Amino acid sequence: ETGVTQSPTHLIKTRGQQVTLRCSSQSGHNTVSWYQQALGQGPQFIFQYYREEENGRGNFPPRFSGLQFPNYSSELNVNALELDDSALYLCASSFAGTYGYTFGSGTRLTVV
Amino acid sequence: QQQVKQSPQSLIVQKGGIPIINCAYENTAFDYFPWYQQFPGKGPALLIAIRPDVSEKKEGRFTISFNKSAKQFSLHIMDSQPGDSATYFCAASSPGGSYIPTFGRGTSLIVHP
């Protein structure tokens, strides 16, 4: 049974650029959630995808968008990057209707 | 608006001590309360979780105490070890919230040898 894998592990982007982060969900899971974790803070929910559609969204602007693919993998896209977007981005997979969330190791994004 | 409040922000204990981390929640619809452990450079990993129909749950050296009327729950780490040094997050979920965990701000624990 494979866990949640995220790529890349680290990324440096310039303010105003766009970035795409990728996540492969754990085997048997069909739901993917994305979180932003700023330094010294708890993970903040961005959005969740189920059946390739957004299934819930936190307090993040529309420049944060995502996709889920038929194999349940997912992408997080962030447009017009701002310095405050620098954070660890975590992907978590789960089976719909259950509490068990498995997290990946995250992508560390630095915006300069 | 912070739905899950966690304290303290940081904690330092000696090996063998019993660190206690506290959390309080506001939303009475929450019915699942997990604790996650996070090491530097890693994602959070589920440590132990409790449902509100019990007041205590133990798994190895980790114990959750739950007080439904006070809307509070806490994590106790018995006989703490240097390897327990990590950041701990409490969280809460509900079916109405699509089971999505809402996290506290975290507690950085250091256990000195």
Image (tube, helix red, strand yellow):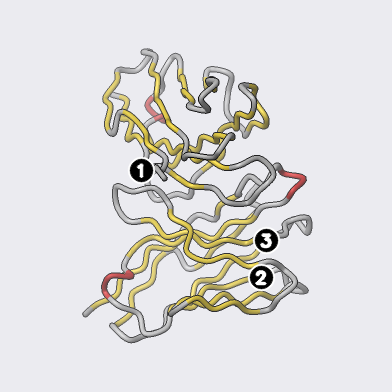
Return the mark for residue B25: 3
N-term-proximal mark, 3 vs 2: 3
Label 2 is placed on what type of residue? Gln
Residue B13 image label = none
Q: Residue A90 placed where, x, y %? A: 44, 39
Q: Amino acid at mark 3?
A: Tyr
Task: Give how far apart the Cα atoms at labels 3 and 2 are.
Answer: 6 Å
Q: Position of residue A25 (x, y in %)?
A: 47, 35
Tell me the distance, in whole angstroms, between the alpha carbons under discs 2 and 1: 29 Å
Q: Which residue lies at the image location 53% right of the left edge and 28% below the top edge?
A: A72
Residue A8 visible here:
yes
Circle 1 sits on which residue? A105
Q: Is residue A64 left or right of residue B81?
A: right
Q: Is residue B81 above or below residue B99?
A: below
Q: Mark 2 — on which chain does it sit? A: B
Chain bearing tag 1 is: A
Task: Please name the residue that numbered disc 2 is placed on.
Answer: B72
Q: Are marks 2 and 1 in contact (CB under 8 Å)?
A: no
Give the foreground label among 2 and 1.
1
Residue A87 x %, y %: 38, 36
**Chain holding disc 3:** B
Q: CA distance from mark 3 to mark 1?
A: 27 Å
> Looking at the picture, do discs 3 and 1 lie on one chain?
no
Disc 3 to disc 2: CB gap under 8 Å:
yes
In this rendering, is residue A82 above or below B67? above
Q: Give B28 or A40, whichever is nearer the viewer.
A: B28
Q: Specify the quadrant of the image occupied by residue B108.
A: bottom left
Residue B81, given in percent of the width and then of the height, sits at 30, 77
Helix, strand or loop at label 1? It is loop
* Residue B96 as seen in the image, left or right of residue A66: right
